[in-house]
Image (cartoon, helix red, strand yellow):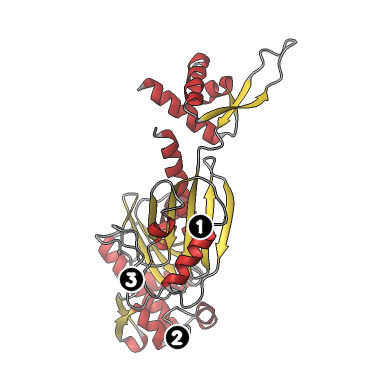
Amino acid sequence: MVRSLTDEQVLRALMRHPRLTRAELATETGISKPTAGESVRRLSEAGLVVDTGERTPGGRGMGRVGSYYSLAPDVGTALAVSIAPEGVVAEYINAYGDSIARAEAGVGRPARPDDVAEALGRAVAEFSFPVRFAVVSAADPVDRHTGRLRQLPDAPFLLGEIDPVAVLGERVDGPVLVDNDVNWAAEAERKAAPLDDFAYVFLDEGLGCAIVSDGEVRRGHHGLSGEVAHLITEGPGGRAMPLIEVFGELGLRRPGTTAIDVERLLDTRPPEVVTAVGGLIAALATLIDPELVVIGGRWGTPLLGALADETDQQPRPVRLQAAAVQQEPSLAGARAEALDRLRSQIIGP
């Protein structure tokens, strides 16, 4: 057990630094030089650590020459994938947390299952790195038991169902983890803030919500928690209606789809939209009692001030906050999970 813990310390140190000598490993981990040397020997025999061939300056009063060690080049990579209306993005992550390759493939509108599956396969086929683990973010409801993307009524993106696990199965040596994009955005937010109890409301072409309680995303029995498009709220004229229908009533949908026309919404900023989203926030405050509600998405953040004013008038006001992670938040969450899983798999054996 002691040897195993020591080896884990050494591996984690080498994940933080591209190369270290045995003396530097001892300093970094707080273990003795002989113990660090024995760990390096064991890990080298296991094929996880290699001598880089580089040496420290030595001799003539400068001390002994030291050898630099690093993780073996073939320890593997992780794959982080985003499936979204903008297209499919595949990023390969090494154990240092670097993105070593990125591929993108376009997706038509409306997105058909065969087209999305083909784009996914095309994106990951551009490179041939050994992949230990894959994490997929999908702008669609995800069945938590199977990883399949499910079609729900009024889905703005995918028309049908696809199975990313099956598509990636031949290209990934280990497991494939699939989850909804808003859940991954909430994971990125949780690590950036950090926060333990909050709701993440995503307002873009589609509507989504993630619930984080006690530091974990709550996904529900089927994995469909947070699918708020059909939550009943106040629509135009004070009528009760599903949230997604408010945008149809106001003429804010893209032609032939339920996707929200973000540019038109930002140009007009109708107060009815603020009232309708305020109803969603009121429901969240009542049902889950979050510390705060994080607002993300292309039109969510610009309307934050108006939403905060609306929320302040409610019986259960709750603090609103703009998302800290604005650049590809879903992919950022998937990337962080892929890195954690990759490192755990390298250390596990």
- Which residue appears farthest toward the left when viewing the image? 221
Residue 324 visible in the displayed image: no
Q: Residue at x 44, y 51 (%)?
A: 134
Instruction: Give the mark nearest the N terminus, 1 or 3.
Output: 3
Q: Nearer the viewer, residue 277 or 297?
A: 297
Amino acid type of the residue tagged 2 in the rendering: Gly
Q: Which residue is mark 3?
A: 228
Q: Residue at x 73, y 10 (%)?
A: 61
| The image quarter in which residue 27 lies | top right
Amino acid type of the residue tagged 3 in the rendering: Val
Q: Which residue is mark 1?
A: 325
Q: Nearer the viewer, residue 79 or 256?
A: 79
Instruction: Give the mark nearest the N terminus, 3 or 2.
Output: 3
Give coordinates of residue 154: x percent, y percent: 36, 78
CA distance separating discs 1 and 3: 22 Å
Q: Residue at x 39, y 25 (%)?
A: 4
Give coordinates of residue 49: x percent, y percent: 53, 29
Give coordinates of residue 262: x percent, y percent: 51, 77
Instruction: Give the mark nearest the N terminus, 2 or 1.
Output: 2
Give coordinates of residue 258: x percent, y percent: 41, 80
State yes or no: discs 3 and 2 in contact (Cβ < 8 Å): no
Q: Is residue 224 left or right of residue 254?
A: left
Are there few (<14), some (14-19), or many (20+) residues within 10 Å of tag 2?
Answer: few
Kind of element beneath mark 2: loop
CA distance separating discs 3 and 2: 21 Å
- Counting every numbered tag in the picture gives 3
Kind of element beneath mark 3: loop
Q: Quadrant of the C terminus?
A: top left
Q: Nearer the viewer, residue 292 or 172?
A: 172
Q: Which residue is mark 2?
A: 256
